[in-house]
Amino acid sequence: MQRFKQRAETDGCRFIEPVLPETGVVVDVGCGNGALASWVANSNESVNVFALDKELNQLSLTQVLQTNLFYIESDAYALSLTDNSVDLIYLHAVCMYLVPLSTVLEECNRVLKIGGQIALRNGLSVVNNMELFVNGELLSKVLNHSLRKNSDNPNIAFTIPDILKSMHFYEISTNTSIESSRSIEEIQQVANSTIELLDGKIGNDALQENIITANELEELKMGIKEWSMDNKAYNKAVWIEHIYIKVKKYDRNSKLACKI
Ligand SMILES: C[S@@+](CC[C@H](N)C(=O)[O-])C[C@H]1O[C@@H](n2cnc3c(N)ncnc32)[C@H](O)[C@@H]1O
């Protein structure tokens, strides 16, 4: 929880700041303890912020009363908001819990005004970061293949641009930032869980569909094991990537790009 709180207060603010409207309605879906929504409300008193979560019991008791911040208990799959009423809707560290994500994005689409924006920020599993150290190309080929096939995969961030494109959002942009961590336990945990994935359905699918040969799969697993035992890895090896996606919506009926 402390980790999420810290992210919401630092990285979360940096993520949302460039897309904050000057006035209007901003919605935080899955607001958690409310730290980011509170920062948004505080940073611009001309916007009204609606902070939604399916459970509002995580709100910080020390929260200061803000006249432009409203908490609503609401499920992301059925937002308690009217159509075409929102200027910016964002989901920070929430998408991995939402399956199918496309239903939630349709809901976001429904409540957004024409010209409104959606901003999503999500962590990618640390698994992907090993690509930098182990036979990266092969590992990413296997994982991406599986991620694209299984829409309920926790690494949903890979599929977000595709879902949005299919919903006729435009100006989709993604950025990645990298964060390092230095715990030996974390590295070993990541290595073991990746080997488990390769031993299980993900590895099997990749073999069956000729994404990888049996020899390559064995080499990959060996590489991951060696990487996790390498002392030098501990100082720099676990990276957590974040993907940012900002989207502007256009009028599907008129097909005219609207003024943002
Ligand atoms: C990791 S926390 C992130 C909280 C906050 N956005 C932040 O960045 O600190 C994920 C939040 O998503 C909420 N959540 C999960 N599924 C949800 C759903 N179906 N509808 C609404 N909120 C949901 C959880 O209750 C939790 O507060």
Image (cartoon, grey):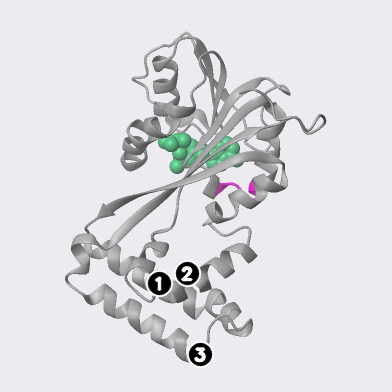
* Helix, strand or loop for disc 2: helix
Q: Nearer the viewer, residue 205 or 169?
A: 169
The answer to whether the residue labelled 2 contacts the one labelled 1, judged by CB atoms less than 8 Å apart, is yes
The answer for how far apart the CA atoms under marks 2 and 3 are is 16 Å
**Residue lying at 21% horizontally and 58% vertically, measured from the top left:** 182
Residue 168 in percent (x, y) is at 72, 41
Confirm if mark 2 falls within 8 A of ligand 1. Answer: no
Q: Nearer the viewer, residue 218 or 170?
A: 170
How many numbered marks does the figure carry?
A: 3
**Residue lying at 54% horizontally and 13% vertically, measured from the top left:** 23
Q: Nearer the viewer, residue 62 or 245?
A: 245
Let me know if residue 258 is in the magenta part.
no
Q: Which residue is mark 2?
A: 140
**Residue lying at 60% horizontally and 84% vertically, measured from the top left:** 210
Residue 49 falls left or right of residue 59: right
Which amino acid type is shown beneath numbered disc 3? Ala
Badge 1 crowding class, 10 Å Cα cut-off, few under 14, some 14 to 19, many 20 or more, is some
Range covered by the magenta-colored residues: 97-101
Residue 224 in percent (x, y) is at 34, 76
Q: Which residue is mark 1?
A: 136
Q: Which residue is mark 3?
A: 214
Query: Where the N terminus falls, by quadrant?
Result: top left
**Residue 109: mark:** none
